[in-house]
Amino acid sequence: DAKTTQPTSMDCAEGRAANLPCNHSTISGNEYVYWYRQIHSQGPQYIIHGLKNNETNEMASLIITEDRKSSTLILPHATLRDTAVYYCIVTRGNKLVFGAGTILRVKS
Amino acid sequence: NAGVTQTPKFQVLKTGQSMTLQCAQDMNHNSMYWYRQDPGMGLRLIYYSASEGTTDKGEVPNGYNVSRLNKREFSLRLESAAPSQTSVYFCASSVNRWEQFFGPGTRLTVL
C-alpha cells in the first residue's frame, strides 16, 4: 500500500471550510484514497473515499489531483464537533493502515 | 440497532494473565477486524475475518488469537498478557471494502 504524508496539525475557524491535504505520490492505479476521522476516545468514523474522480457526500468533499499523487478533504462549514484526528489512507484492499493523521482543531 | 459493541470497556490485568475481548455486530456484516491503538499513534490491524469461518493475520498478530464464533461475533484472546499489550483495542465490521464501522473500544492495562 502507498505511504501517505499529512501535516501533523491544523487549525480552522468555526464556520469556515477546513481543507486537509494528503500526499500519496507512490499511489498505484488500483489503490483507493480513504478518509476516516477519530474524535477523542472514540472509534474511527468513515468519511469518504475515492479512486480518481472528485467525490462529495453529506459530510465532506474529496478532491483528488489528476495525477492522483495528492488529495484534499474539505469540510465545507467546520463546527466545533469536527475537532478530531483525520486519517488519509491509501489501499487496494480492505485492510486499513492508519498513520498518525492530522489533528484538526476547530476554534470559535 | 446497536452497531458494533465491545466488552469489557476497561480491563486491568497482571502480566501472564489471560483474557478474551468480545465483539459483536448486528449489521449482518461479513467482515470483522481487530485493531490496537497505542498512545499518540494510529490504529494497527491485529487480525481480521473476511467471512464466517475464516481468519487472517494483520500487521501485529503476535501474542493474540481470534475466533469468529459466528457471523455476529469476533473475539480476541490474550493467552499470556504482557505490558507491551497495554493499549486501546477496537473492533470493526464492514459489508464492503469502503466503510468500516468501529466499536467504542476496550482500554486494557497490563501491569
Image (cartoon, coloured by chain):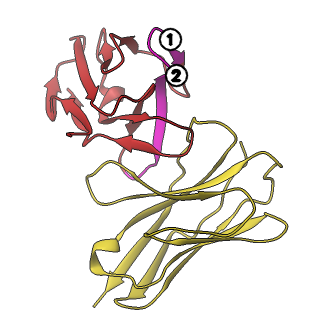
Chain colours: A yellow, B red
Q: Left or right: where does residue B3 sit relative to residue B56?
A: left
Using the numbered discs, state the Cα–Cα distance from disc 1 to disc 2 in whole angstroms.
6 Å
Residue where numbered disc 1 is placed? B54
Q: Quadrant of the C terminus of chain B?
A: top left
Q: Where is residue A67 in the image (x, y as percent from the top left)?
A: 85, 66
Residue B65 quadrant? top left
Whether discs 1 and 2 lie on one chain: the answer is: yes
Give the label on residue B50, or none: 2
Residue found at x 36% / y 91%: A15
Span highlighted in magenta in the image: B40-56
Q: Mark 1 falls on what kind of element?
A: loop
Do residues under tags 1 and 2 come within 8 Å of each other at their CB atoms?
yes
Residue found at x 22% / y 14%: B19
Three-letter residue code for mark 1: Thr
Q: Residues within 10 Å of mark 1 (few under 14, many from 20)?
A: few
Q: Where is residue B98 in the image (x, y as percent from the top left)?
A: 55, 45
Q: Left or right: where does residue B23 sit relative to residue A20?
A: left
Give the label on residue B69, or none: none
Chain letter of disc 2 in the image? B
**Residue B60 is covered by the magenta coloring:** no
Residue A68 quadrant? bottom right
Considering only vertical position in the picture, is A48 above or below B97? below
Chain letter of disc 1 in the image? B
